[in-house]
Image: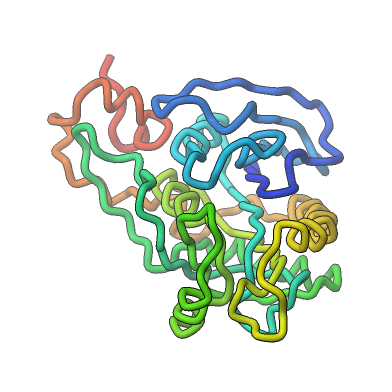
Amino acid sequence: MKIGIIGGSGLYQMEGLREIQEVALETPFGPPSDRLTTGRLHDREVVFLPRHGKGHRLLPSEIPFRANVWALKKLGVTHLISVSAVGSLKEEIQPGHLVFPDQFIDRTFQRPSTFFGQGVVAHAQFGDPVCGALRSQLATAAGTLGIRHHDTGTYICMEGPIFSTRAESFMYRSWGGAVIGMTNLQEAKLAREAELCFATIALATDYDCWHETEEQVSVEAVLEVMKNNIATSRALLSLVIQSLSPERHCACKDALKFAILTARELIPQHTRKNLEPIIGRYVPVES
């Protein structure tokens, strides 16, 4: 077991890591958002990657999602936890609360969301886009720590970088959305194709713009709540890393078993090589 962590807004490094090394990888999809940091925490192997790059340099639409997940898989990650700041779409999800989404709605329109193409076609199951076992362990750990949290919810993933209009915010609420963010949907899709167990820690920072008694979203307000949320998420990650079971009984680990439709002999050698960390179990590189 090796645990990958993608840090979102405000979480640019993992505290407490030992035996730290920084790894610079090139991928078939370009460089990742930043160098990957490997180390050990509670005697578990951990790989950390800041989604927006150190210093928050990348817009949501500029994040190299495929390179990030490819690099994590290449380094042996089996479980991926994504930390993300979000807006709340429900009264009961107050700023400062954590949500562990179990569903997504995609409102992005200019982002690659699959490793496939270039001579290979695959269709992975995505009805349950989050690893139920990993999400459950996050929720249990949050309860142990007394963190105000919500076990489930639908994450609306919008394009950004500008926030929603009020009309859009009310529409997303009518769809049953719990939180809204700009990053996690692509990570969930690519993690499924990479056969990783994936779950999100969504940190509610504001009420988006639907809440009539709250001010509209401002960067200043988001950052203030974020400071507290980041400290909470670090404590949660530490406990989960310590207690996470290495056994994988979920379907995530075999997500591509019946997903690749292309006749094996027709898959180009360069595609086999580029996707070796992703499909190597099923389509080996020819010698």
Quadrant location, the C terminus:
top left
Residue 11 appears anywhere in the view: yes
Check the image and report above or below for 73 versus 185.
above
Is 77 rendered above or below residue 160?
above
Which image quarter: residue 48? top right
Say which residue appears at 37% left-offset and 68% top-offset.
127
Question: Which residue is drawn at the image coordinates 78% and 41% (left, top)?
Answer: 14
Going by the image, does 255 lie left or right of 137? left
Residue at 32 percent across and 54 percent down: it is 124
Q: Is residue 32 left or right of residue 222?
A: left
Which quadrant holds residue 96?
Answer: bottom right
The N terminus lies in quadrant? top right
Q: Is residue 113 left or right of residue 35?
A: left
Closer-to-camera residue (225/33): 225
Q: Nearer the viewer, residue 184 or 89?
A: 89
Q: For residue 236, say whether it is visible.
A: no
Q: Nearer the viewer, residue 74 or 168?
A: 168
Q: Percent x, y for residue 147?
A: 81, 71
Question: Where in the figure is residue 208, as x and y percent of width and height?
Answer: 62, 71
Count of marks placed on residues: 0
Place of residue 284 in the rendered image (x, y in percent of width and height, measured from the top left): 31, 28
